Amino acid sequence: MSTTDHLARRLDDAATSRTAIPQFDADTALDVPTAYRVQQAVVDHRLSRGERPVGLKLGLTSRAKMAQMGVDEVIWGRLTDAMHISDGGTLRLSAHIHPKAEPEVAFLVHGGAITAVAPALEVIDSRYVDFRFTLPEVIADNTSASGFVLGAWQPLPDGIDNLGVLLEVDGRPVQTGSTAAILGDPRRALAEAVRLAAASGVDLADDSVLLAGAATAAVRLRAGSHVRVTVDKLGTASLRVAS
Ligand code: 0L1
Ligand code: MG
């Protein structure tokens, strides 16, 4: 088995068994192009179980997250239909390892252009112990992608570059921020996603969902809680957490 297939198998096993794995050995020497090949192989495991690709996500889109990782490059991952949770729907903790939610903006893309926008929650769930990873390791892990909730799609209004974002748990504010934290303007996500995915030979297909990035830090999900994002002008998206 190649190193790529071996690492992809370990990450897929971690996800399906809900068991975090340690970071790879130092002598694994994973570079960024190889990490994207591992990511493709990880997602291929999902597709072989019948999941369908539905779009892409960007990660590390805020200065704060880039500084935390010591990098200055956005990363991207792949979304499948099985990751979609309907608005107001339920996430089962037992189907995850240690999931967190972060408030985002989502775009619908057709013909290379943004055709609609929605408030969104991304559920991230690192397959590594304690969310500890290097940049290539988190790329290989499909940038921690695990779930997403989309609020109502609507035409892209003018000026979404500095909208207020509120993340509430059980009706209490836990994070506040602005869409400005997403690449300075979330609309930049489209060009970034096209550029980054093209480097791996991947196109943004028509009717793809694009998760543009997080507007605040992520919050850990706890059984019984209700999590809601509100983005000014765009509305809300929410999920319930069951054990
Ligand atoms: O969507 C994101 O920005 C997450 C990227 C991966 C880093 C993490 O798991 O926090
Ligand atoms: Mg995210």
Image (cartoon, rainbow, N blue to C red):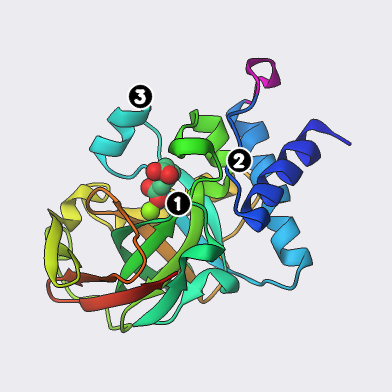
Quadrant of image for the C terminus: bottom left
Looking at marks 2 and 1 on the same chain, the residue that comes earlier in the sequence is marked by 1
**Labelled pair 2, 1 in contact (Cβ < 8 Å):** no
Numbered disc in front, either 3 or 1? 1
Amino acid marked by disc 1: His
* Residue position for label 1: 98
Residue 156 appears left or right of 52: left
Compared with 125, 211 (above or below) is: below
Q: Inspect the magenta stretch and tell me whether residue 36 lies in it.
A: no
Residue 70 numbered tag: 3
Report whether residue 164 is seen: no
- Where residue 126 appears, as percent x and y from the top left, is 50, 46
Amino acid marked by disc 3: Gly
Which of 82 and 232 lies nearest the eye of the viewer? Answer: 82
Looking at the rendered structure, the secondary structure element under dot 2 is: helix
Numbered disc in front, either 2 or 1? 1
Amino acid marked by disc 2: Ala
* Residue position for label 2: 140
Which of 201 and 22 lies nearest the eye of the viewer? Answer: 22
